[in-house]
Image (spheres, rainbow, N blue to C red):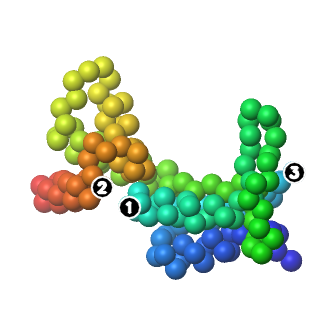
Amino acid sequence: MRTEAAKCAAEVRKYLKAKGVKATVKSKNFSMGDSVRVKIQEIIDPKVLKEIELEVSKYQYGSFDGMQDLYESTNVNPNIPQTKYLFVEYDYGVADGFTEALKVVLKEKINWIGANPDYEYEKMARGILFGTNDCMAWEEAVSSLVAYLTKTEAA
């Protein structure tokens, strides 16, 4: 017999496969709850990442309110398998590789004047990856990155 979290993970896996997104999906059971962790294994458009987060949020039946120190079951749906916590994130190796390469491209395109430019380029690159920074459009970032990688491979 599979746990509710395992059933939930299977549903999320099906959704991601239908969407064509490469990811690992793991469930975990622990005292007082369970969780499902989705690790995206490839770089995807931030809009697609937001779509995924929105679509799979139905599998989490509530959220933790830190101000009151309690879990509120605000999204219960008895018709689908659900978990207490659901996390969607990039695999660190994938995100870090993209961010490091994009930082080089940003340094060439944007001349940051100010304290701690490495931190600012890192913040910009992460913002582009997650769709929270509009210093460069996603399409421009990807095409600039492809051009940079092609240039370095040719050298």
Camera-side residue: 124 or 58?
A: 58
Q: Residues within 10 Å of mark 3 (few under 14, many from 20)?
A: few
Q: Secondary structure under badge 3?
A: loop
Q: Position of residue 66 (x, y in %)?
A: 73, 35
Q: Earlier in the sequence, mark 2 or mark 1?
A: 1
Q: Dots 2 and 3: beta carbons under 8 Å?
A: no
Q: Residues within 10 Å of mark 1 (few under 14, many from 20)?
A: some
Q: Is residue 115 left or right of residue 108?
A: right
| Residue at the disc numbered 2 | 138
Q: Is residue 97 left or right of residue 27?
A: left
Q: Position of residue 29 (x, y in %)?
A: 81, 58
Separation of residues labelled 1 and 3 (CA atoms): 35 Å
Q: Residues within 10 Å of mark 2 (few under 14, many from 20)?
A: some
Badge 1 amino acid: Asp
Separation of residues labelled 2 and 1 (CA atoms): 7 Å
Q: Position of residue 150 (x, y in %)?
A: 17, 60
Q: Residue at x 31, y 36 (%)?
A: 121
| Residue at the disc numbered 1 | 45
Q: Dots 1 and 3: beta carbons under 8 Å?
A: no
Q: Earlier in the sequence, mark 1 or mark 3?
A: 3
Q: Dots 2 and 1: beta carbons under 8 Å?
A: yes
| Residue at the disc numbered 3 | 32
Badge 2 amino acid: Trp
Separation of residues labelled 2 and 3 (CA atoms): 40 Å
Q: Report if residue 6 is visible in the image.
A: no
Q: Is residue 125 above or below residue 53?
A: above
Q: Earlier in the sequence, mark 2 or mark 3?
A: 3
